[in-house]
Image: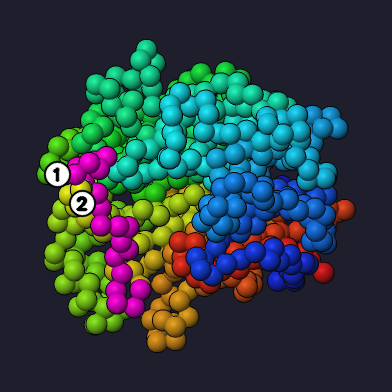
Amino acid sequence: MRYSPLDQINRSNIRDLRVAWTYHTGDKRDRPRTTIECTPVVADGLMYITTALINVCALDAASGKLVWRFDPFAGSPDYEATGAESIRGVNRGVTYWENGRDKRIFVTAGPRLVCLDARTGRPVAGFGNKGSVDLTKGLGKDISGMMYDVTSPGVVYKNLLILGSEVGEGPEPAAPGHVRAFDARTGEMVWIFHTIPEPGEVGHETWEGDTWKTTGGANDWGGLSLDEERGMVFLALGSAAFDFYGGQRPGQNLFANSVVALDAATGKRVWHYQIVHHDLWDRDLPCLPMLVTVNQEGRRVDAVAQVTKFSKVFVFDRETGKPIFPVEERAVPASDAEGEKAWPTQPFPLKPPPYTRQAFTEDQITNISPEAHAYISEIFKKVRGGDPYLPPSEQGTIVFPGFDGGTDWGGGSFDPATGWLYVNSSDQPWIVTLVRAKPGAGSPFAITGYNRFEDQDGYPAIKPPWGQLTAIDLNKGEMAWQVLLGEFKELTARGIPQTGTQNIGGSVVTAGGLLFIGATKDEKFRAFDKTNGKVLWEAQLEAGGYATACTYEVDGKQYVCITAGGGGKPRTKSGDAFVAFALP
């Protein structure tokens, strides 16, 4: 839920927060730009991190001094042949496991799961093949030549490590996104949940003919959540491939775009709820489901809250999957792309309200300057828009909220004391245009690319706000407050009111009455008053903090640490710093 009971740092003293230490990883690159999206893990006084090139480091959590460092790619044939920058990708951190004196760190390096001794950083020889497991095996399908890695750390249930994956999303053949559990001691696969159901499994009927065999995706790339007491693991699954054309995967396409609850010990489905039917807009569920407890009609209900790329919040009873607030199936536009059968309805939760605008209409064209307005107006006339479920087209279709949200992988945070959910979001439209694919391609259509809809200076095509932070009272299903998040100083210098910026990364809320978040293009790290959204403190980072912060205590002292890795989707300069703050 990204909540900390620590309160040494609080509203009364936050103004005194200072840099305690900084660790530079030394492996940032500018071409191509690297990023660091890692949330540190702290255990036994050590902080475990992953770097821009996915080295694993253990730092002294109080001083930031390096204890050990391990490069999981060093010596691998792929690394030697292609070079570090081309194969390492993005990694959001490690998973920690312990059983008595046996303490281990798990990290994924490309398609390999690597197990390290948490005290020394050395591979655990008895795990898999000399400390690693090939994740391309055991999927029930030959995925040679297909993309497969893991961007977000797994969860541990007893002696099981449960993992999602990142797979291809384009028109070419893609690997299936099945979720698996591995024995944390040996590396043996214990169970597999087919996110694209096979014959005889629930949901198989939502795939016509043999399309279940030829379709990939439906993967959990944004993280999983564990209810250890109930022995349940919760998945947030992405779209089936190809993201923008489903003519070759007709049907509702379970379990793509679904929240799925599994028995953590066996991988058996407990319940599911599909949030987007037959996705055509890359509306993956981008972040882990949040385990929350809400007050409903005088009783406490354990629930699961899922925030989305399209800025809607779905809240379900944790045990049954029944929506806490009503959800309506509403008719949505049909597709005119050859061979496409868009699903006729989509779910609309009646509460809470969406936390960003839901459509880009002509009256919303940017007004930051006459030149920008005229530039965008000309493009707007040539493409389709005005409905969040308008299917992709050869003419060009505005997708808003866009491919990165709304909310992306950073997700939200939750305060169990109040029942309030906090979520950051971006208002960034995109344009998707279908084009006829070359003969022999995996799909009759491809796209012209992931095209941000921006003015000639690179600002969003839509009127501000462009970035916001929202508090939602989940007890009532109502918005508590909403404030701007981020600033373009060059625009405020021109007399344009604060706009907010695109933001990537999440927040953490504390018992000290604070919410900490980086995420913004202005490369600042901020602390907000969680009751009203007022900024109480901010620090300028060396590069953008495009990750979720962590807070921890060592020897009675509370620290807050954020990654300053820059780069990534906000397209700012790269960095290589982990920065910890504390009181003097």
Could you tell me if the residues under marks 1 and 2 are in contact, i.e. CB atoms within 8 Å?
yes
Mark 1: amino acid:
Ala
Question: Residue 410: horizontal and vertical position, in percent?
Answer: 52, 51
Residue 583 magenta: no
- State the quadrant of the N terminus: top right
Q: Main secondary structure of the magenta part?
A: loop
User: How many angstroms separate mark 1 from mark 2 (CA)?
Assistant: 8 Å
**Residue carrying label 2:** 434
In this picture, is 195 found above or below 489? above
Where does the magenta region start and end? 439-458
Q: Which residue of the protein is positioned furthest toward the bottom in this rendering? A: 494
> Which element type, helix, strand or loop, lies under badge 1?
loop
545 w.r.t. 172: above or below: below
From the viewer's perspective, is 228 left or right of 452? right
Residue 342: x and y in percent read 20, 37
- Residue in front for this viewpoint, 464 or 86: 86
Residue 312 placement, left or right of 133: left
x 36%, y 53%: residue: 403
Residue 337, numbered circle: 1
160 left or right, relative to 520:
right
N-terminal label among 1 and 2: 1
Q: Which amino acid does label 2 sit on?
A: Leu
Q: Which of the numbered marks, if any, corresponds to residue 315?
A: none
Nearest to the observer: residue 139 or residue 302: 139
Residue at image position (55%, 34%) is 135
Residue 138 horizontal side relative to residue 96, left or right: left
| Residue 447 colored in magenta in the image | yes
Q: Quadrant of residue 181?
A: top right
Q: Quadrant of residue 116?
A: top right
